[in-house]
Image (cartoon, rainbow, N blue to C red):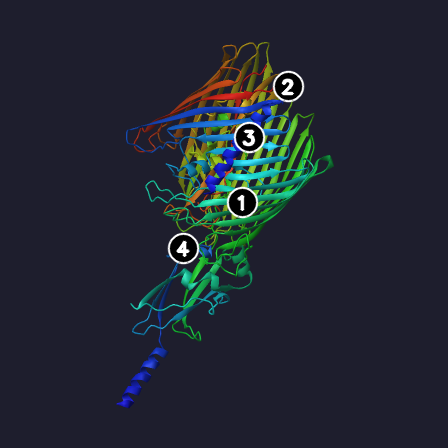
Amino acid sequence: MKKIFSLLISACIFSTGIAQLNISLIVNGQPPAQLSEWGNRREVLTLIVSAPGVIGESFKLKTEIKLIDGTVIATTDLAKSPVFIPSTTGTTILVANDVMPLEYMVFTGKYKTSLERTGKMPADNYTICTKPVRTTDYGPMGEMKCKNFYLATTQLPILMKPYNEEVLDAKKAQTAIIFRWSPVVPRQISPVTYRIQVFEVLPTQSPVQALRSNQPVLDKEILAATQYIWQPQLSFSWIGPDEDLGYVISENKSKIKEQSMRFIWTVQSLDKDHNPVTRTDGNGEGRSEPILFFVSIKNPILLK
Amino acid sequence: MMNRKTICVLCIAIFGCGHFLYAQTKKPAPFSVSGTAGVSYEGYGLHRNPSGWTGYQPRKPWNQVRFNFTPTFKLGKNFSLPFNFNFAAIPTNFAGPFAGIKKPSFGQFITNPMNSFGLNPKYKWAELQLGTQYLKYSDLSTGDIGVFGIGFDLRPKTLLFKFFTGISQQGINYVAGPPTVVGAYKRRNWMAQIGTEKEGKYLFALNIAKGKDVPTSSAPPPVTIRPQEGLVISVVSDLYMDKGFYFKAEGAQSIFTKDVATPLTLLLKGLKPFIEAHTSTITDYAAQAAVGKKSKNFDIGVMVKYLGAGFQTIGYPFLQSDRLDYTVNNRINAWKNKMNIVATLGQRINNVSNTALKAKQFIGNLNWFTQFNDKFSLNVNYNNFGFQTASGINPFGIKNVSNDLGINPTVTWAGKKIIHLISMSYNYSKYDERDVITGLTTSNNTHTTLLTYVPTYLEKEISPDFSILYFYNDVPGAKIALATISSALSMQVAKKKLRLRGQLQYTLGKLNSFSNSNNLIASCNIDFKLTKKLNWSTFLTTNYFKYGNEIIPNGANYVETTCRTGFQYRFNTKK
């Protein structure tokens, strides 16, 4: 009886000793370039840990980020990384902040520099691998799982035409104004919707103030194209006293009063769900750096 | 709390300044007021046909009232008190943190970028800055954001001491909607500058600007926006030398936390006690330099600007980083000032940090004006913008090239009673775009021709003008033609107290083989000088647009009307 009891205890100890955790890693193939953003989006990385019929033993996750050729560029500092205890229900779901806690990840060389400077790694194909390890000697408690992903910083469009501070003739502008911008880079999986907005800058406003406070005179969504021909259907006309704006151009014996209305325009790049293509860069709204253009109104008033 | 303190200080300052002015009036001191004050109303109407069709959206608030009060009181040579109060009754924010807000709290109203409440009492070299201030310290530190708060600008002799602190945005709660309000965190700002400056000679200054969001300032908090914190330190120097030579340079470092809710870390750089490093903190550099020479007839300048990929500053929220620009600018006046040439040549490299997807953008502009004689002048302009980059996994890279050529001759001749001006203009615009899958380039060609006739009567108070324009755009799959005729008439009546201007424009449009679209715009300006100091300006416009059968429902049309009217009082009490 004593012998049988000893055997049972030994079997129990043995089974705990070789406790294996099954893990399943799911990674978005093209996650946000900003690594700190991974933690804010559950869909980026999910790790399902299951411990079938095993008494729960705490574990840590050893995670590595590698290049396609296998070079390790980042690894978890296991001495500091968090400890997990498998759920009593048998399945534990972990996300990016658990699998790849940036505060405990040690990056190497240019990847460390890049992360410090930009919060991103250089555009490339990478592999993320993770495995559960014991908290004592960091010995494996399960199979290593790897997934590939591609990182590239999304570059918002550059506004091309009208170029910054271009002066447009009111007669032409009243019929049509052509807007052009560069596409989002790299090319997105689904077509980008470009929301073009034009704001009038009132005489008492600064350009960015106008953008942040006025209702746009043009607010149009363009799917996948990088040009828009706008028929403004506006009467470009200055309403205040002549002294308030403009300058005088001498042309022979006549003088023409010239006044300018100011406009600021920008493009917001949206994905298929109508969300900004990038929320982590710049203003977080996916809006390109706005630029100004002027509409020059030449009122033929003879100044005597 | 910050707001209350700031408002109290503002009230004390206004009262104090008023008291100071009153006290000073006991002594005879030169007192003057300049500037303006006014109120304007804008009404907008949109009537769409058929009823229930929503294919065209309103683009102005239905009603808006704007106020401005911007006098400058001057007492003696040394004291001035400029007011800058510009505000509107109804919030109309569409972009940025205030977008969608309908019923603002008092704090939100005060800090809304559509409203400014600024006061800058100044005595000799000391200026107190109160209320809303749009302070530009430099190109790389802070400049685009209005902050409501308190600060000073001291310039004893050649020294510079500036400091300002306040709130650039209030907390705005997230509303799922519809309509959705994205929401925002309350943002506190601090900025300081210390340096030395002699106007027109040199400037050397150290700038520091910081902004920090308050994570608990909105409930529920924004879903897509993270609370942030940013610090930028920059050194700026300008030198203006003899013979028009100049040199300007600025170097800056930013430390920016994209999400203050992320854990603190020792692995990244912070700058205690100003800012601590979180796992989302980034640190990068930016620099710009310009050197050149300016003179009456010849300018030349070279400008280089580099913004590191992680350079981010709260003072310029729309700045696109990760780029390198370099341009050469040139201006020449020749032929006894009858020829004027302005040219820019340069390149912009975007995505500098990313060797695989580096994008190059060529920039070339030329404007050449020549006044051949009293009767004939010619303006030629050419612009080129090219954008080229690899396209990641696609077989071909992105390549977009925009070319524009404009030719504009003008002929004038004078009779005894009338001066005639005929201006012709032709523009050719070509936009090539490469498909990243097939490698095929599509060309988008636009031709614009404009003819304008302006007779100027020497003995009459009327000034008409007439113009005709043809616009044609051709891209595979779409051909757009627009023909416009327009005419305007300006006149002055009632002993020049009343100025009138009316304009009528008709545009016939055609898209591919669809039926024509029609557009008629009529507008009228009335500017009435009620007294020497008081003006009443009114602007009325109506726009009728009827689509061709390119959209459903066929025959859809709309009428838009806008009425702006306002009184403007001009202070002028110089004694």
- Estimate the spatial distance between the alpha carbons at disc 3 and disc 1, rounded to whole Å: 25 Å
Q: Nearer the viewer, residue B1 or B165?
A: B1
Instruction: For residue B494, say whether it is visible.
Output: yes
- Estimate the spatial distance between the alpha carbons at disc 2 and disc 1, rounded to whole Å: 57 Å
The residue that label 3 is drawn on is B17
Q: Chain of mark 4?
A: A
Q: Is residue B294 left or right of residue B439?
A: right
> Residue B408's quadrant in the figure?
top right
Label 1, secondary structure: give it: strand
Q: Chain of mark 3?
A: B
* Callout 3 and callout 1 share a chain: yes
- Estimate the spatial distance between the alpha carbons at disc 4 and disc 2, rounded to whole Å: 68 Å
Q: Chain of mark 1?
A: B
Between circles 4 and 3, the one closer to the viewer is 3
The residue that label 2 is drawn on is B374
Label 2, secondary structure: give it: loop
The residue that label 1 is drawn on is B190
Between circles 2 and 1, the one closer to the viewer is 1
Which quadrant holds the N terminus of chain B? top left
Kindly identify the residue that appears in the image at 43 percent across and 36 percent down: B109
Q: Nearer the viewer, residue B187 or B480?
A: B187
> Residue A100's quadrant in the figure?
bottom left
